[in-house]
Amino acid sequence: MRNRFLSLIVVLLAVLGVAFAQTPQQPAAAQANAAAPAPQHDLSAVWLFNERTRTLTGEVPPMLPEGKAKFDANKPGFGPRAVAGGNDPIGHCDPLGLPRSLLSRYPIEFVETPGRVLQFFERGHVWRDIWTDGRELPKDPEPKFYGYSVGKWQGDTFVVDTVGFDERTWIGSLGYPHSDAMRLQERYRRVAHDTLELTITLVDPKVYTKPWVSDTQIFKLQPETELEESFCVPSEEEAYNRRMRYPAAGIDY
Protein backbone atom coordinates (compact mmCIF):
# COMPACT_ATOMS: atom_id res chain seq x y z
CA MET A 1 0.00 0.00 0.00
CA ARG A 2 2.81 2.38 0.93
CA ASN A 3 4.59 1.74 -2.40
CA ARG A 4 1.37 2.39 -4.30
CA PHE A 5 0.90 5.69 -2.42
CA LEU A 6 4.46 6.78 -3.17
CA SER A 7 4.01 5.89 -6.85
CA LEU A 8 0.85 7.99 -6.99
CA ILE A 9 2.72 10.99 -5.54
CA VAL A 10 5.52 10.58 -8.09
CA VAL A 11 3.02 10.52 -10.98
CA LEU A 12 1.18 13.56 -9.62
CA LEU A 13 4.39 15.55 -9.28
CA ALA A 14 5.38 14.60 -12.81
CA VAL A 15 2.05 15.82 -14.20
CA LEU A 16 2.30 19.08 -12.28
CA GLY A 17 5.87 19.55 -13.48
CA VAL A 18 4.81 19.21 -17.12
CA ALA A 19 1.92 21.64 -16.58
CA PHE A 20 4.11 24.29 -14.96
CA ALA A 21 6.79 23.82 -17.60
CA GLN A 22 4.26 24.45 -20.41
CA THR A 23 2.55 27.49 -18.89
CA PRO A 24 5.34 30.05 -19.58
CA GLN A 25 5.56 28.87 -23.19
CA GLN A 26 2.00 29.86 -24.06
CA PRO A 27 2.56 33.66 -24.04
CA ALA A 28 5.80 33.10 -25.93
CA ALA A 29 3.94 31.15 -28.59
CA ALA A 30 1.38 33.94 -28.95
CA GLN A 31 4.17 36.50 -29.25
CA ALA A 32 5.89 34.37 -31.87
CA ASN A 33 2.71 34.22 -33.97
CA ALA A 34 2.25 37.98 -33.68
CA ALA A 35 5.84 38.55 -34.77
CA ALA A 36 5.64 36.07 -37.66
CA PRO A 37 6.03 37.48 -41.16
CA ALA A 38 2.82 38.68 -42.77
CA PRO A 39 1.52 36.18 -45.36
CA GLN A 40 1.81 37.54 -48.87
CA HIS A 41 -1.45 38.09 -50.76
CA ASP A 42 -3.50 36.34 -48.09
CA LEU A 43 -6.22 38.01 -46.04
CA SER A 44 -8.12 34.82 -45.20
CA ALA A 45 -8.95 35.10 -41.50
CA VAL A 46 -11.32 36.70 -39.03
CA TRP A 47 -10.47 40.32 -38.18
CA LEU A 48 -11.80 42.85 -35.68
CA PHE A 49 -11.71 46.62 -36.02
CA ASN A 50 -9.28 47.79 -33.36
CA GLU A 51 -10.82 51.22 -32.83
CA ARG A 52 -14.24 51.80 -31.35
CA THR A 53 -15.50 54.61 -33.55
CA ARG A 54 -18.58 53.98 -35.65
CA THR A 55 -18.05 56.31 -38.55
CA LEU A 56 -15.42 56.96 -41.19
CA THR A 57 -12.60 58.95 -39.62
CA GLY A 58 -10.50 61.60 -41.28
CA GLU A 59 -11.46 65.17 -42.15
CA VAL A 60 -15.07 65.37 -43.32
CA PRO A 61 -15.15 67.35 -46.59
CA PRO A 62 -17.59 70.23 -47.06
CA MET A 63 -21.02 69.18 -48.29
CA LEU A 64 -22.85 70.43 -51.34
CA PRO A 65 -26.43 71.71 -50.82
CA GLU A 66 -27.94 68.33 -51.71
CA GLY A 67 -25.66 66.59 -49.24
CA LYS A 68 -26.33 69.14 -46.49
CA ALA A 69 -30.08 68.69 -46.92
CA LYS A 70 -29.72 64.94 -46.53
CA PHE A 71 -27.45 65.35 -43.53
CA ASP A 72 -29.93 67.68 -41.82
CA ALA A 73 -32.76 65.21 -42.47
CA ASN A 74 -30.88 62.31 -40.88
CA LYS A 75 -31.54 62.01 -37.14
CA PRO A 76 -29.00 59.68 -35.54
CA GLY A 77 -29.38 58.00 -32.19
CA PHE A 78 -25.71 58.48 -31.33
CA GLY A 79 -23.25 61.34 -31.11
CA PRO A 80 -23.65 65.12 -30.83
CA ARG A 81 -26.71 65.20 -33.11
CA ALA A 82 -28.51 62.35 -31.33
CA VAL A 83 -32.30 62.50 -31.28
CA ALA A 84 -34.50 60.23 -29.19
CA GLY A 85 -36.04 57.73 -31.59
CA GLY A 86 -34.03 58.96 -34.56
CA ASN A 87 -34.41 57.69 -38.12
CA ASP A 88 -31.28 55.56 -38.45
CA PRO A 89 -32.06 52.92 -41.12
CA ILE A 90 -30.79 50.15 -38.86
CA GLY A 91 -33.77 50.81 -36.59
CA HIS A 92 -35.83 49.01 -39.24
CA CYS A 93 -33.24 46.29 -39.90
CA ASP A 94 -32.00 47.85 -43.13
CA PRO A 95 -28.48 46.63 -44.06
CA LEU A 96 -25.59 48.74 -42.81
CA GLY A 97 -23.97 48.90 -46.25
CA LEU A 98 -20.49 50.31 -46.84
CA PRO A 99 -18.30 51.62 -45.38
CA ARG A 100 -20.34 51.33 -42.18
CA SER A 101 -20.13 47.53 -41.98
CA LEU A 102 -16.33 47.71 -42.17
CA LEU A 103 -16.06 49.92 -39.08
CA SER A 104 -18.50 48.23 -36.73
CA ARG A 105 -17.64 46.51 -33.46
CA TYR A 106 -18.40 43.11 -35.00
CA PRO A 107 -15.77 40.87 -36.63
CA ILE A 108 -15.44 40.33 -40.37
CA GLU A 109 -13.93 37.43 -42.27
CA PHE A 110 -12.18 37.17 -45.63
CA VAL A 111 -12.48 33.94 -47.60
CA GLU A 112 -10.45 33.77 -50.81
CA THR A 113 -11.65 31.61 -53.70
CA PRO A 114 -10.61 31.48 -57.38
CA GLY A 115 -11.85 34.65 -59.05
CA ARG A 116 -13.60 36.03 -55.98
CA VAL A 117 -12.97 37.14 -52.39
CA LEU A 118 -15.90 36.78 -50.02
CA GLN A 119 -16.14 39.22 -47.16
CA PHE A 120 -18.46 38.07 -44.38
CA PHE A 121 -19.89 40.46 -41.80
CA GLU A 122 -21.09 39.10 -38.47
CA ARG A 123 -23.42 42.09 -37.98
CA GLY A 124 -26.49 41.20 -39.99
CA HIS A 125 -24.98 37.86 -41.05
CA VAL A 126 -24.37 39.06 -44.62
CA TRP A 127 -21.60 38.68 -47.16
CA ARG A 128 -20.16 40.72 -49.97
CA ASP A 129 -18.63 39.59 -53.29
CA ILE A 130 -15.31 41.13 -54.35
CA TRP A 131 -14.58 39.93 -57.88
CA THR A 132 -10.92 39.24 -58.63
CA ASP A 133 -11.23 37.61 -62.06
CA GLY A 134 -10.17 40.73 -63.95
CA ARG A 135 -13.60 42.07 -64.80
CA GLU A 136 -14.27 45.81 -65.01
CA LEU A 137 -16.71 47.75 -62.89
CA PRO A 138 -20.15 48.05 -64.53
CA LYS A 139 -20.89 51.35 -66.26
CA ASP A 140 -24.49 51.65 -65.03
CA PRO A 141 -24.88 49.31 -62.07
CA GLU A 142 -28.14 48.51 -60.34
CA PRO A 143 -27.97 50.14 -56.89
CA LYS A 144 -27.25 47.68 -54.07
CA PHE A 145 -26.76 48.07 -50.35
CA TYR A 146 -23.17 46.82 -50.67
CA GLY A 147 -22.54 48.00 -54.22
CA TYR A 148 -20.59 46.12 -56.89
CA SER A 149 -16.93 45.45 -56.07
CA VAL A 150 -13.81 44.36 -57.94
CA GLY A 151 -10.41 43.82 -56.37
CA LYS A 152 -6.80 43.22 -57.31
CA TRP A 153 -3.37 43.08 -55.70
CA GLN A 154 -1.00 45.99 -56.20
CA GLY A 155 2.23 44.82 -54.63
CA ASP A 156 1.40 43.99 -51.00
CA THR A 157 -1.88 45.95 -51.06
CA PHE A 158 -5.32 44.54 -51.90
CA VAL A 159 -7.22 47.31 -53.67
CA VAL A 160 -11.02 47.14 -53.85
CA ASP A 161 -13.12 49.55 -55.95
CA THR A 162 -16.89 49.69 -55.50
CA VAL A 163 -19.73 51.49 -57.29
CA GLY A 164 -23.50 51.21 -57.49
CA PHE A 165 -24.67 52.02 -53.98
CA ASP A 166 -28.19 52.26 -52.65
CA GLU A 167 -28.35 55.76 -51.17
CA ARG A 168 -30.57 54.75 -48.25
CA THR A 169 -27.59 53.64 -46.13
CA TRP A 170 -25.57 56.00 -43.96
CA ILE A 171 -21.79 56.30 -44.01
CA GLY A 172 -21.75 55.90 -40.23
CA SER A 173 -23.90 56.15 -37.14
CA LEU A 174 -23.56 59.96 -37.06
CA GLY A 175 -25.82 60.34 -40.08
CA TYR A 176 -23.42 61.34 -42.86
CA PRO A 177 -25.15 60.67 -46.18
CA HIS A 178 -24.12 59.57 -49.65
CA SER A 179 -25.78 59.35 -53.05
CA ASP A 180 -26.01 56.62 -55.67
CA ALA A 181 -22.94 58.21 -57.30
CA MET A 182 -20.66 57.30 -54.40
CA ARG A 183 -17.48 55.40 -55.22
CA LEU A 184 -15.32 53.69 -52.62
CA GLN A 185 -11.75 52.50 -52.76
CA GLU A 186 -10.44 50.30 -49.95
CA ARG A 187 -6.75 49.54 -49.62
CA TYR A 188 -5.91 46.59 -47.36
CA ARG A 189 -2.33 45.87 -46.32
CA ARG A 190 -1.34 43.08 -43.96
CA VAL A 191 1.60 44.70 -42.21
CA ALA A 192 2.14 41.86 -39.72
CA HIS A 193 0.85 38.38 -39.10
CA ASP A 194 -1.86 39.71 -36.77
CA THR A 195 -2.33 43.28 -38.07
CA LEU A 196 -4.28 44.52 -41.08
CA GLU A 197 -4.32 48.16 -42.16
CA LEU A 198 -7.14 49.73 -44.16
CA THR A 199 -7.51 53.14 -45.74
CA ILE A 200 -10.72 54.23 -47.43
CA THR A 201 -11.27 56.91 -50.05
CA LEU A 202 -14.85 58.00 -50.66
CA VAL A 203 -15.80 60.12 -53.66
CA ASP A 204 -19.36 61.39 -54.08
CA PRO A 205 -19.73 64.36 -56.46
CA LYS A 206 -23.40 64.83 -55.53
CA VAL A 207 -22.78 65.19 -51.79
CA TYR A 208 -19.18 66.25 -51.04
CA THR A 209 -16.94 68.87 -52.60
CA LYS A 210 -13.84 66.67 -52.50
CA PRO A 211 -12.78 63.11 -51.66
CA TRP A 212 -13.16 61.90 -48.09
CA VAL A 213 -9.96 60.06 -47.14
CA SER A 214 -9.94 58.08 -43.92
CA ASP A 215 -7.18 57.78 -41.40
CA THR A 216 -5.48 54.38 -41.35
CA GLN A 217 -7.84 51.92 -39.73
CA ILE A 218 -6.35 48.98 -37.81
CA PHE A 219 -7.77 45.47 -37.64
CA LYS A 220 -6.45 42.70 -35.41
CA LEU A 221 -6.41 38.99 -36.19
CA GLN A 222 -8.90 36.88 -34.23
CA PRO A 223 -7.50 33.35 -34.60
CA GLU A 224 -9.92 31.69 -32.16
CA THR A 225 -13.06 33.47 -33.37
CA GLU A 226 -15.89 32.04 -35.45
CA LEU A 227 -18.53 34.42 -36.77
CA GLU A 228 -21.76 34.12 -34.84
CA GLU A 229 -25.32 34.31 -36.09
CA SER A 230 -26.21 37.96 -35.58
CA PHE A 231 -29.33 38.73 -37.58
CA CYS A 232 -31.34 41.89 -37.22
CA VAL A 233 -34.80 40.42 -36.58
CA PRO A 234 -37.62 42.87 -37.44
CA SER A 235 -39.96 41.61 -34.71
CA GLU A 236 -37.23 41.98 -32.07
CA GLU A 237 -36.26 45.41 -33.38
CA GLU A 238 -39.87 46.58 -33.23
CA ALA A 239 -40.18 45.26 -29.67
CA TYR A 240 -37.09 47.32 -28.77
CA ASN A 241 -38.62 50.36 -30.48
CA ARG A 242 -41.78 50.03 -28.42
CA ARG A 243 -39.91 49.43 -25.18
CA MET A 244 -37.14 52.02 -25.56
CA ARG A 245 -37.06 54.27 -28.64
CA TYR A 246 -40.71 55.34 -28.84
CA PRO A 247 -41.10 56.20 -25.13
CA ALA A 248 -37.80 58.13 -25.18
CA ALA A 249 -39.00 60.14 -28.18
CA GLY A 250 -42.51 60.68 -26.80
CA ILE A 251 -44.00 58.79 -29.76
CA ASP A 252 -47.53 57.50 -29.28
CA TYR A 253 -47.79 54.09 -30.90
Image: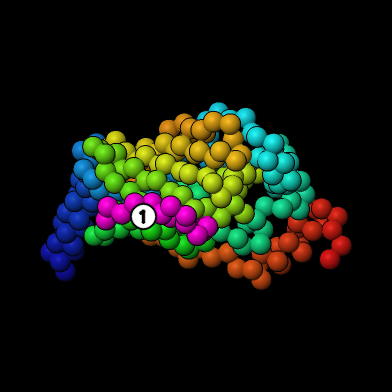
Work out whether residue 24 can be spotted.
no
Name the one closer to the observer, 100 or 249.
100
Residue topped by disc 1 = 130
**Which range is magenta?**
133-148
The part of the image, by quadrant, that contains residue 69 is top right
Q: Residue at x 25, y 48 (%)?
A: 42
Q: Is residue 229 left or right of residue 71?
A: left
Q: Position of residue 53 (x, y in %)?
A: 55, 39
Q: Residue at x 23, y 45 (%)?
A: 41
Q: Position of residue 225 (x, y in %)?
A: 37, 56
| Residue 140 forms part of the magenta stretch | yes
Name the one closer to the observer, 79 or 7.
79
Q: Residue furthest front?
A: 139
Q: Position of residue 73 (x, y in %)?
A: 74, 46
| Residue 22 forms part of the magenta stretch | no
Q: Position of residue 245 (x, y in %)?
A: 75, 56
